[in-house]
């Protein structure tokens, strides 16, 4: 792979990560949000794939395949199942922050990410670390989605956006943090999604919906 | 030998989980959990002996590290696990009798508790930050089901908040780990995330990246340790979980997360100087104490009262860690054990109270001292220990933290300690006031009071008495624990 092509592919996949994160902030239809999330999984796997091709590493290529299966296949499928169980209540009706303000916030968070990750780029300037702030931006946007959405499923997607961002940063700065930890992290994320999926089901059983505003029994 | 001992605290509970998975909850398996907790405690004590003799850390099988600090934490886990396990059979029997549980949910309960123990043991024995993270996240997953076990509105709500806040918090910590790994790779020493190499290479870590990493790690593990600002899940989860699980979560799980912060502080102090982590921890400590004080004053629920008191004690630990040095760290570690013993006994007592009176409201309980004198006595002793009366060890450790804080020679630490003491006094007044309202006064003379309240089961009574008694003994003399405590404090406090 030529250096120019490598740079372009790197920028393209990292850009796709950020774009999909912003799209999640923009859309309200939960089925669409899940589809966008799956696209982001593909972009993340492609990013790892590009790194693998550049370094000629078979291990990294296998990891890329794992990322594709987990984040573009298994996790979206689990989310879709949770949504199907929800019946016709499929829209994020009243997020705490309206769409226009959310998009502005996403832009502000991206700038913030660029500002705080300056030391990362300075430590080892290279095309990969220069893309790392984008991963940080995705983490911040995910956190924003997590705290401003009221539907259980949208919060779950926010958590997964954070996780995609962290994985992207991990691969961009150090090509992964060791196989044992990588597998452990993937397993933990999968289990968290399962747990939250089960809790969503129980929430529907006892509250009759998954609007988190209903969670008001416990307070001081 | 060390290998076998190091794996025992992880494998024994894992095996216990398998046994319960296969055989379920029946008469023959009633005491399996207690036996496994006791074995964890025995292994912890033996490992502690080895660690003190060896002086520094031994890496086992590449991913476990046995040093005085991890051995000490394992002792805490073992001690609290034994108390909680002693009370578990009677708790489950009472739940089954009341129709709130059946054999299947009881079996699930014990399987999850055993897995929970194994994950905590792995967390404190992990030789590297990555494995520690995986283990801590595993505790969240396992305990989520325990918190949401009853499937009521409140339990589901508590479980949801717990998983979302802790997973998001711990995700921030993961980002911190990624960045720390990045900084470590660029030291040119070949260090990764292993504690030993990371500490050795800490002087060469890039300060800019390490600073971001430390903030994320303290915030992330702080969420799991119940430190403000990400503490909102704690009162809900601890009040909704079944009593033996609350005891474990409040008594040790918080401290296990705090242990991660202690380890990170070692690296941070070497890389960035002691000022950076100190600032973060002081802020977290004062915020946690303020939250606890303001919400305890008008607390209406006795389990939530205990939960907020845990936030208070985590704040005190953060204060002690911020002070730094061997003396303050030894006090912090002693406080971890004292708090674990007393708080777990109190949660077990509160669970018993909930089962016998049917309410967790403070104003729903009156005249407990006449109704159930033994339970009332245990609760009173535990509460006195919790607010820091001598002879309990919490008095000694709080005094140690305060003395180190005033003697640190850093003005801001002195002022923070003074402010913290004021908040501690406010909290103590609130706790004593609420508890005395529950214990004293005339028992409510409803028509049904002719039937005597059920007797306290012997195993539960043992746990309730043993917790405060052990804390009192520890307050009089640290005894054989003293060398371990000093060695563990040196691991963190960095003896110059």
Image (spheres, rainbow, N blue to C red):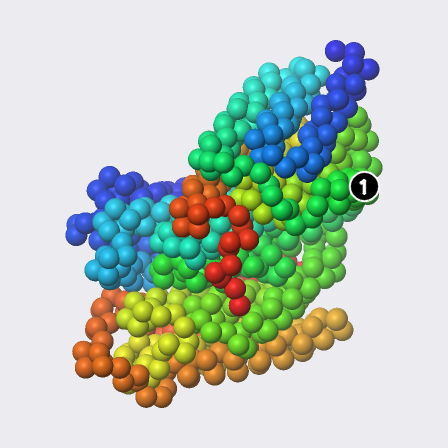
Confirm whether residue B283 shows in the render: yes
Q: Nearer the viewer, residue B82 or A184?
A: A184
- Tell me: residue B435, above or below residue B164: below
Query: Which quadrant of the view contains residue B297?
Result: bottom right
Horizontal side, residue A8 vs residue B144: left or right: right
Badge 1: chain ID: A
Q: Is residue B53 visible from the viewing direction of this image?
A: no
Q: The N terminus of chain B is located in which quarter?
A: top left
**Image point (54%, 65%), residue name:** B311
Residue B443 in the image, given as x and y percentages of width and height: 30, 85
| Residue at image point 39% right, 81% down | B438
Residue placed furthest toward the top: A1
Horizontal arrangement in the rendering, residue B188 relative to residue B397 (left or right): right
Between A37 and A54, the residue placed more toward the observer is: A37
Where residue B459 sits in the image (x, y, percent)?
A: 25, 66
Q: Nearer the viewer, residue A127 or A82?
A: A82
Which residue is at a point 76% across and 73% down the rendered structure image?
B411
In this rendering, the answer to whether B109 lies above or below B431 is above
List x then y, in percent, for residue B72: 47, 58
Residue A128 figure quarter: top right
The residue sitting at 37% across, 76% down in the picture is: B364
- Write down the residue under mark 1: A111
Residue B131 place in picture, x, y as percent:
52, 40
Q: Secondary structure at mark 1?
A: helix
Q: Which residue ends up furthest to the bottom in the rendered image?
A: B441
Count of numbered circles in the view: 1
């Amino acid at each position: 792979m030529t250096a120019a092509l490598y740079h372009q592919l790197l920028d393209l996949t990292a850009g796709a990560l950020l774009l999909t994160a912003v799209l999640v902030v923009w859309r309200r239809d939960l089925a669409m949000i899940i589809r966008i999330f799956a696209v982001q999984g593909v972009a993340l796997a492609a990013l790892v794939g590009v790194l693998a091709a550049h370094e000629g590493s078979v291990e990294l290529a296998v990891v890329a395949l794992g990322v594709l299966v987990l984040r573009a296949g298994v996790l979206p499928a689990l989310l879709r199942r949770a949504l199907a169980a929800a019946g016709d209540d499929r829209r994020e009706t009243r997020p705490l922050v309206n769409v226009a303000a959310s998009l502005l916030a996403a832009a502000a968070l991206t700038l913030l990410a660029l500002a705080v990750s300056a030391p990362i780029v300075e430590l080892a300037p290279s095309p990969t670390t220069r893309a790392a702030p984008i991963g940080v931006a995705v983490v911040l946007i995910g956190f924003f989605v997590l705290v401003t959405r009221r539907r259980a499923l949208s919060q779950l997607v926010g958590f997964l956006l954070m996780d995609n961002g962290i994985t992207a940063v991990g691969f961009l700065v150090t090509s992964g943090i060791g196989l044992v930890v990588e597998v452990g992290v993937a397993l933990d994320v999968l289990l968290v999604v399962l747990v939250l999926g089960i809790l969503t089901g129980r929430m529907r059983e006892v509250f009759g919906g998954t609007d988190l505003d209903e969670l008001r029994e416990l307070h001081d | 030998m060390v290998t076998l001992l190091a794996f025992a605290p992880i494998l024994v509970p894992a095996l216990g989980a398998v046994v319960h998975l296969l055989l379920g909850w029946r008469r023959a398996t009633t005491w399996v959990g207690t036996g496994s907790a006791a074995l964890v405690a025995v292994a912890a004590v033996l490992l502690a002996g080895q660690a003190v003799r060896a002086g520094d850390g031994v890496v086992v099988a590449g991913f476990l590290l046995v040093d005085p600090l991890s051995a000490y934490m394992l002792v805490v886990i073992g001690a609290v696990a034994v108390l909680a396990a002693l009370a578990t059979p009677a708790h489950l029997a009472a739940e089954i009798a009341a129709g709130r549980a059946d054999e299947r949910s009881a079996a699930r309960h014990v399987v999850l508790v055993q897995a929970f123990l194994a994950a905590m043991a792995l967390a404190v024995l992990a030789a590297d930050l990555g494995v520690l993270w995986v283990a801590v996240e595993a505790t969240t997953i396992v305990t989520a089901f325990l918190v949401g076990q009853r499937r009521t509105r409140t339990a589901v709500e508590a479980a949801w908040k717990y998983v979302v806040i802790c997973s998001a918090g711990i995700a921030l910590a993961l980002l911190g780990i990624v960045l720390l790994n990045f900084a470590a790779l660029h030291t040119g020493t070949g260090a990764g995330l292993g504690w030993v190499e990371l500490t050795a290479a800490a002087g060469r870590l890039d300060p800019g990246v390490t600073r971001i990493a430390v903030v994320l790690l303290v915030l992330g593990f702080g969420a799991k340790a119940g430190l403000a600002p990400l503490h909102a899940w704690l009162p809900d989860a601890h009040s909704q979980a079944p009593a033996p699980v609350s005891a474990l979560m409040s008594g040790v799980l918080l401290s296990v997360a705090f242990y991660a912060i202690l380890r990170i502080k070692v690296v941070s102090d070497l890389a960035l100087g002691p000022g950076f982590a100190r600032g973060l921890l002081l802020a977290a400590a004062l915020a946690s104490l303020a939250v606890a004080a303001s919400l305890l004053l008008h607390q209406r629920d006795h389990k939530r009262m205990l939960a907020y008191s845990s936030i208070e004690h985590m704040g005190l630990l953060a204060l002690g860690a911020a002070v730094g040095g061997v003396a303050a760290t030894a006090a912090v570690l002693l406080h971890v054990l004292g708090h674990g013993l007393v708080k777990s006994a109190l949660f077990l007592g509160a669970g018993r109270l909930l089962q016998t009176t049917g309410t967790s409201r403070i104003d729903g309980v009156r005249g407990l001292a006449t109704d159930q004198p033994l339970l009332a006595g245990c609760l009173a002793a535990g509460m006195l220990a919790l607010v820091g009366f001598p002879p309990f060890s919490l008095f000694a450790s709080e005094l140690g933290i305060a003395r180190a804080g005033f003697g640190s020679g850093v003005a801001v630490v002195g002022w923070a300690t003074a402010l913290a003491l004021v908040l501690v006094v406010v909290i103590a007044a609130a706790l004593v006031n609420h508890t005395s309202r529950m214990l004293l006064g005339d028992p409510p003379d409803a028509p049904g009071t002719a039937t005597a309240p059920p007797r306290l089961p012997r195993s539960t009574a043992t746990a309730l008495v043993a917790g405060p008694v052990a804390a009192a003994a520890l307050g009089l003399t640290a005894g054989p624990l003293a060398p371990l405590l000093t060695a563990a404090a040196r691991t963190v406090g960095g003896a110059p």
